[in-house]
Image: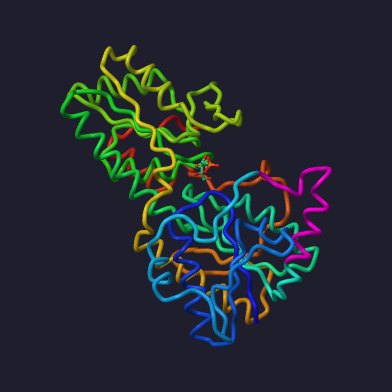
Amino acid sequence: MKLGVCTGGGDCAGLNAILRSLVLTARTRGDTAIVGIVEGINGLAFNPPQHQVLFSPKGGGLDEFTLDCLLTMGGTYLRTSNAGNPFRDAKAGATYKADVIRGYKALGLDGLIVVGGDGTHCIAAELASGGVKLIGIPKTIDNDYVDSELAVGFTSAVNVAAEAILRVNTSGTSHGRVMVVEVMGRHAGYIALNAGIAAGADAILIPERPFSRERLAKHLKEKVLSRKKHAIVVCAEGAHAEGEELQYRSSASGSRHLGGVGDAVASFLHDALDRDTRCTSLGHTQRGSQADPVDRILAARFATRAIRLAHENRFGSMVVLRKGQVEVASYPKARSRGGAAARCLISSDPTIVAAEDMGIYCGEVP
Ligand code: F6P
């Protein structure tokens, strides 16, 4: 059997651990070749397809040193693309799809393992109608893949964010300041909530629960700054105040990216509390770490199961984690990225309950 693998969407820690696990499993079986597709499914659209043999039972593939490095190395060895849905382009979409399918057939693939978040899988799902046999592995630092309680990349990102918040905290304590830390989290506040608790935050602002400016200021004044001279506010990039819009930044190329709410919160708190405030936005540092042990183990469990599914001819599936067990869900249906249903925190989530029980302000119940 010859399986392709590609990584799509934003990079994260653990992608390379997945590639390594696929290679080790194929090598152990001795009956499976693993072909890496370069830069997401885009690589298939080139003529010839942009690819690299990661393992072949006939010989060739990654050397031992590279395989060792992949276990912990951040980013993706195969590179990736995070540039919207190419199939939705009215003019070029159909040609692009035909090119991708041609590339898949030209490589003689029996299936394609797609590693990505919801957006990537929704895009890849378009290929099923063209005969591309798909198996999916969920990855996203936001941990918002709808079917899986854990996605590869999340715990490593939480480690980075928690470490950074602790470092900011030491400066906050020394100077008696209100320190705001903005973390990633477009639709879901899992990074903010988990890193915030792990690093001793006094308030955690998440997309799912719009915050009240007044209640945030009151909480910090009466419950926090009455006891100590500093405070830590952790804020997801997708958080917003009640009745207010999301905050965006423009890049040099003119595209809009979520971000800036941390600065807005710091500026508001400076005036409301008459305190020195600072904001640190962690941005892509959260995606740049080594894979932590949880991600390395999850990568191994997902990748080995994906290869089993291929040999059982169970294409059209996703490996997911439910109640700590790897299970098999249906591959998502093709739909536009904007329509993606993200997994989000609900107010009864035990981690939110724990935070509130400890007196951490977590926004308002919607
Ligand atoms: O979806 C994961 C994520 O990290 C979001 O939290 C963030 O908004 C986005 O990726 C940033 O993506 P890019 O690398 O394209 O700026």
Residue at (41, 76) in percent of width and height: 64
Residue at (29, 15) in percent of width and height: 273
Residue 164 quadrant: top left
Residue at (82, 53) in percent of width and height: 95
Residue placed most toward the observer, 247 or 364: 247
Count all numbered tags in the image, as a single digit: 0
Quarter of the N terminus within the rendering: bottom right
The reply to whether residue 201 is in sight is: yes
The question of residue 96 being in magenta is answered with yes
Residue 195 quadrant: top left
Give the dominant element type of the magenta stretch: helix, strand or loop: helix
The question of residue 26 being in magenta is answered with no
Q: Is residue 228 left or right of residue 265?
A: left
The part of the chain drawn in magenta is 84-103
Compared to residue 239, the image places residue 131 above or below, namely: below
Compared to residue 279, the image places residue 324 above or below, namely: below
Residue placed most toward the observer, 191 or 65: 65
In the image, residue 206 lies at what x, y percent? 45, 35
Compared to residue 29, the image places residue 72 above or below, namely: above
Q: Is residue 285 left or right of residue 39?
A: left
